Image (cartoon, grey):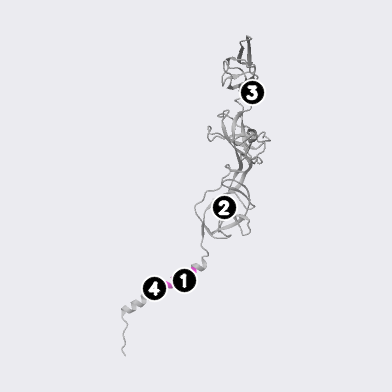
């Protein structure tokens, strides 16, 4: 039997193999320890800061600037107009002569005088033409209002006394304010014309046109920049909630029973972040945000902006803050 002696090289190989096995065991042990004691992984979330804002629900309507006072001066004598004394834009006082008529056959003169003070906004009298109808229109151009047309689908939402925001193409982003005044009890016209008046009915006796209801809106703010006849766009504030908590729609979740809730981010003394479900009720909604109310809500608290899939107590880590809901001092509008 031959005994083979162990060379130094063999001993070195054994040492290297032993060290490698030991290092592998250490690594496996660390992985096991981490998996056992480190807990669940943290879920990245985007957040927002809870704030308050004024929320509004509005109804849109078209309109036109009109005067609060209009007087039409008529004459049906058929006597030819001899001379016209005023033109559009002239201011006249009550009793001022507007034009003269001359009856050549009777050799008689007749004056047409103003029955009110105001600005001439239309002149229909023509030299040599017989006087037959409205010759002049007088209006108060310094006291304006809006004749607003409310859609049939919105008439039940609008009431006298509601606030109105008014814009025109000519005045850009400037917002004039007014208040809904008198609302007509019947439709003023149908889209494409009043079928009942014009006789434009189909064989079934119905029409596809939709009715509109006129409402007068006195302008509360300074009306410089507005002129009679301008087309306007109105937003009637049918509901308003000043200074309420609000969040984007995606920030609201539901629990297994269908109750609405938001998720707040809490940080412990070690800096670990977890989420807490806070029950909330919903209020007025705009295009971008919804009102929320709840006993645990506090201004400035950090909420998850999209809590889909989260569960109470889940560990999270913050991503960059997302766009928050409107803050106090801002106003958000939404169609009613």
State how far apart marks 1 and 3 are (Cα). Answer: 98 Å
Residue sitting at the far front: 203
The mark that comes first in sequence, 4 or 3, is 4
Residue shown at the point (63%, 22%) measured from the top left: 72
The mark that comes first in sequence, 3 or 2, is 3
Circle 1 or circle 3, nearest the eye? 3
Between residue 122 and residue 223, name the one nearer to us.
122
Q: Which image quarter: residue 230? A: top right
Quickly name the residue at label 2: 251
Residue shown at the point (52%, 59%) measured from the top left: 43
Q: Pointers 1 and 3 in contact (CB under 8 A)?
A: no
Q: Pointers 3 and 2 in contact (CB under 8 A)?
A: no
Pick the quarter of the image with the N terminus. Answer: bottom left
State how far apart marks 4 and 2 are (Cα). Answer: 52 Å
State how far apart marks 3 and 2 are (Cα). Answer: 57 Å
Majority secondary structure in the magenta region? helix
Judged from the image, the secondary structure of the residue bearing numbered disc 4 is helix
Residue shown at the point (36%, 78%) measured from the top left: 14
| Image location (x, y in percent) of residue 95 | 64, 16
Q: Is residue 141 magenta?
A: no
Q: What stretch of residues is rendered in magenta?
A: 20-33
Judged from the image, the secondary structure of the residue bearing numbered disc 1 is helix
Instruction: Using the image, tell me which numbered label, if any, was put on residue 71.
Output: 3
Instruction: Using the image, tell me which numbered label, if any, was put on residue 37.
Output: none
Quickly name the residue at label 1: 29
| Image location (x, y in percent) of residue 335 | 59, 43
- Residue neighbourhood size for the residue with mark 4, other residues' Cα within 10 Å, grouped as few (<14), some (14–19), many (≥20): few
The mark that comes first in sequence, 1 or 4, is 4
Between residue 326 and residue 269, name the one nearer to us.
326
| Image location (x, y in percent) of residue 252 | 58, 53
């Amino acid at each position: 039997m031959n005994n083979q002696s162990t060379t130094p090289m063999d001993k070195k190989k054994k040492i290297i193999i032993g060290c490698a096995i030991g290092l592998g065991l250490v690594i496996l042990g660390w992985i096991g320890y981490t998996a056992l004691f480190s807990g669940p992984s943290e879920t990245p979330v985007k957040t927002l800061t809870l704030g308050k804002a004024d929320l509004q629900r509005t109804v849109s309507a078209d309109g036109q600037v009109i005067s609060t006072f209009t007087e039409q001066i008529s004459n049906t004598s058929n006597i030819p107009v001899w001379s016209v004394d005023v033109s559009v834009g002239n201011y006249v006082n009550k009793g001022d002569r507007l034009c003269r008529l001359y009856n050549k056959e009777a050799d008689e003169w007749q004056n047409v005088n103003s029955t009110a003070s105001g600005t001439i906004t239309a002149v229909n009298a023509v030299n040599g033409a017989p006087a037959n109808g409205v010759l002049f229109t007088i209006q108060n151009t310094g006291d304006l209002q809006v004749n607003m047309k409310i859609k049939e689908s919105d008439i039940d939402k609008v009431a006298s006394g509601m606030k109105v925001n008014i814009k025109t193409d000519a005045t850009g982003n400037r917002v004039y304010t007014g208040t809904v005044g008198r609302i007509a009890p019947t439709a003023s016209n149908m889209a494409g014309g009043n079928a009942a008046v014009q006789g434009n009915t189909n064989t079934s006796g119905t029409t596809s046109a939709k009715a509109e209801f006129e409402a007068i809106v006195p302008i509360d703010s300074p009306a410089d920049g507005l002129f009679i006849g301008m087309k306007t766009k109105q937003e009637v504030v049918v509901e308003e909630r000043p200074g309420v908590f609000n969040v984007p729609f995606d920030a609201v979740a539901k629990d297994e029973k269908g109750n609405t809730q938001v998720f707040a981010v809490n940080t412990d003394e070690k800096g670990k972040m977890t989420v807490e479900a806070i029950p909330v009720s919903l209020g007025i909604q705009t295009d971008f945000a919804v009102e929320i109310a709840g006993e645990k809500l506090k201004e400035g608290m950090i909420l998850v902006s999209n809590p889909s899939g989260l569960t109470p107590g889940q560990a999270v880590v913050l991503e960059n803050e997302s766009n928050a809901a409107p803050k106090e001092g801002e106003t958000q509008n939404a169609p009613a």
